[in-house]
Amino acid sequence: MAKTILIGLDGATFTVLDPLMADGVMPFLRDLVAEGVRATLRSVVPPLTPPAWTSLMTGKRPGEHGVFDFFQKEAPESRYFRFTTSHDVQSATIWSTAGECGLRSNILNFPLMFPPPLLNGCLVPGGWMPWRQLRLGCRPAGLFDRLKELPSFKPRELSHDMELEEKVLEGCADEEYLDWITLHTRRERRWTEIFLYLMREEPADFSAILFDGVDKLQHLCWRFLDPALASEAPTPWERDVHWACRNYFRELDGLIAEIVAGAGPDATVVFASDHGFGPTSDIFYINAWLEKQGWLAWSGDRGARPDATHQVGINQIARHVFEMDWERTLAYAATPSSQGIHIVPRGPDGSGGVPAESYDRFRRELVEALKNLRHPDTGRPVVAEVWARDDVFAGPFEPWAPDLTVRLEGDAVVSILRSDAVMGRRREPAGTHRPEGVFLARGPGIQRGAAVAELSLLDVAPLVLHSLGVPIPDDVSGRLPLQALESGSSPRRFATAAGVRSSATAIAAHEPIGLESALDAEEEELVLKRLSALGYLE
């Protein structure tokens, strides 16, 4: 059976890739596109790393697989949030479905892979997991010790040395940029060497690797990557940073070439990003706006209670729990990353919150106020779209989602910080997520030299399963993108009840790894700083 390779390019966008291919910075990718098919890939709501990659790997929307954000409510009615983990992925994935059919998978650096799920093959988690946990996350047992023999193996860089990543916490100093870009260039090489080692020593039917430096460089260095923002008279430092960014993509192109060569000419190669990217300058202080509307009230002090600071950890992650007056707060934003608003339900004792019989009316009032909000400087709308929970998160896990989710005009970002002003502006444009990602594919049965209409992120899983000869489960929301295939292709489908486990069964099976797998307080703080560094926790 022919191999299938999935290469994830976190946050990749044709806005950046097309000029790099045209300028000869990424010649291999340019030639691969000419030999295969390309399309814009429409992300999910919200276009955010955890829900989007989970949707890509399951073919389902967040309300169907259970992942909405970097953080997860402990229960639908709870005010407490914790870090999202692999236990929250409540659906079959490409690799679990392939494994049920007897196929092997090797999965590298994808988010929400810790604690390690059961897998027929090899797993090396990365993403937001602290490097000290990498041994616990590698599967099968003994793989970590084998990888240690590789010349370039360095766990501190593979799974993020959070202390190094902290450099961009409050905006990176000019003298830090080059080292930071070089770090991510080096990380991609380390991941590629592991991938090529497993390709030789542990051959699999399906192999997937995620290059996440694309997302990170675009967050910090967007103004050096977007041709529309190029300086007409760059300083020597700006020229150096611009060169380093282009060199990252030049090196990445070479690593992709090595992977594709290693897979062989008969392999199907699929590229996808979880979302796209674009520039942002405006900041919407959403909780400040809710306060001005009379729907949110802070407690008497200006910060977390001194006696509660030690509790801002894995089980009580959101500081809003200690900062808000819950007797008077009707709606709040817990995290900026989800761009979501949660409506506070009335308590069981009848105090505070919104009573159930007033929920629909209050939600409509919120939506109307958001749509009528105007930027104080331009007079233009601040909010482009507002989605109710049941509109975009329908499914068994809908109750865990925000009641409302917003998309802001001009791709402004949400901040949950206290602020006297409702709107703010960055000194320099930064990169932020947009829903238009990238899809590229080449291999047997794939169209050659074609650009097809926009695909859904949910369509990637059916395509990969089709390329593996695995029937597509009936309960996925994605469809096989026939426009990307040569004529004559048709999906093989089967009811999940007949074979492969569905989201209603014990999908979230994980190998026991003991209590030592829990994040300690220091690791929690470092992960939070990493998320803050990328602008997710403003």
Image (cartoon, helix red, strand yellow):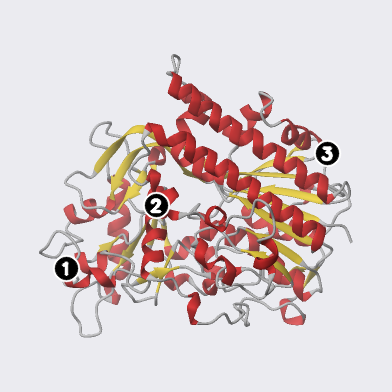
Question: Circle 1 sits in a helix, a strand or a loop, which is it?
Answer: helix
Q: Measure the alpha-carbon separation of dots 1 and 3.
A: 62 Å
For residue 340, above or below residue 433: below
Residue at horizontal 70 percent and vertical 42 percent from the top:
255
Mark positioned earlier in the residue sequence (1 or 3)? 1
Identify the residue position indicated by label 3 in the image. Answer: 448
Q: In the rendered structure, which amino acid carries the disc numbered 3?
A: Arg
Q: Which residue is mark 2?
A: 536
Task: Examine the rendering and report whether any part of residue 204 can be seen.
Answer: no
Residue 441 coordinates in the image, percent (x, y): 75, 45
Label 3 vs label 2, nearer the camera: 2
Q: Quadrant of residue 147?
A: bottom right
On the image, which quarter does residue 81 sit in?
A: bottom left
Callout 2: few (<14), some (14-19), or many (20+) C-alpha neighbours within 10 Å?
many
Under mark 1, the amino acid is: Pro
Label 3: state its secondary structure: loop
Q: Is residue 327 left or right of residue 23?
A: left
The answer to whether the residue labelled 2 contacts the one labelled 1, judged by CB atoms less than 8 Å apart, is no
Q: Position of residue 246 (x, y in %)?
A: 58, 30
Q: Amino acid at mark 2?
A: Tyr
The crowding category of the residue bearing disc 3, from other C-alpha atoms within 10 Å (few below 14, some 14 to 19, many at least 20), is many
Residue ID for mark 1: 306
Q: Looking at the image, is 501 positioned above or below residue 491? A: below
Mark 1 crowd level (few <14, some 14–19, many ≥20, 10 Å Cα): few
Q: Is residue 5 visible?
A: yes
Query: Which residue is rendered at x = 85% and y = 47% of the image?
Result: 486
